[in-house]
Image: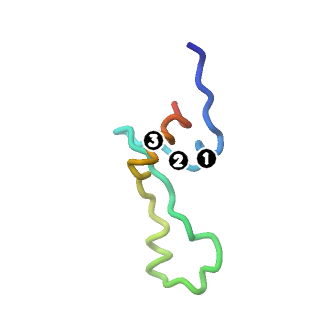
Amino acid sequence: MPKLKTHSGAAKRFKKTAKGHVKRAKAFSRHILTSKPTKRKRHLDATTMVSKADEHKIKRMIPY
């Protein structure tokens, strides 16, 4: 079977954990930050897991 190609856009956005789950960064933290509370901005810094519904599709894009 041929080698699978990694989706380079997905590889930049997602990482696999040791248990095989996929982690991602949170959205809404790039600009117009003055109108957002400090607490909200702080919580947007943290990484989170990809939802169960999307995980299978993401794993196919980052096979290695």
Q: Mark 1 points at which residue?
A: 12
Quadrant containing the N terminus in the rendered view = top right
Residue 29, placed above or below residue 47: below
Give the residue type that dot 2 points to. Phe
Report the disc number at residue 49.
none
Residue 32 percent across, percent down from the top left = 64, 80
Residue 62 percent across, percent down from the top left = 54, 36
Residue contact between numbered discs 3 and 1, judged by CB atoms under 8 Å: no
Q: Name the residue under label 3.
A: 16
Mark 1 Cα-neighbour bin, 10 Å: few <14, some 14–19, many ≥20: few
Residue contact between numbered discs 2 and 3, judged by CB atoms under 8 Å: yes
Q: In this view, does 39 lie to the left or right of 12?
A: left
Mark 2 Cα-neighbour bin, 10 Å: few <14, some 14–19, many ≥20: some
Give the residue type that dot 1 points to. Lys
Secondary element at tag 2: strand
Secondary element at tag 3: strand
Q: Which residue occupies 50% across, 76% down?
A: 41
Q: Is residue 2 left or right of residue 60?
A: right
Q: In this view, does 56 lie to the left or right of 14?
A: left
Q: Which residue lies furthest to the front in this view?
A: 53
Q: Residue furthest top?
A: 1
Give the residue type that dot 3 points to. Lys
Report the disc number at residue 14.
2
Secondary element at tag 1: helix
Residue 30 percent across, percent down from the top left = 62, 70
Q: Which residue occupies 48% across, 37% down?
A: 59
Distance CA(mark 3)–CA(mark 1): 12 Å
Residue 40, placed above or below residue 6: below
Q: Which residue occupies 57% across, 70% down?
A: 29
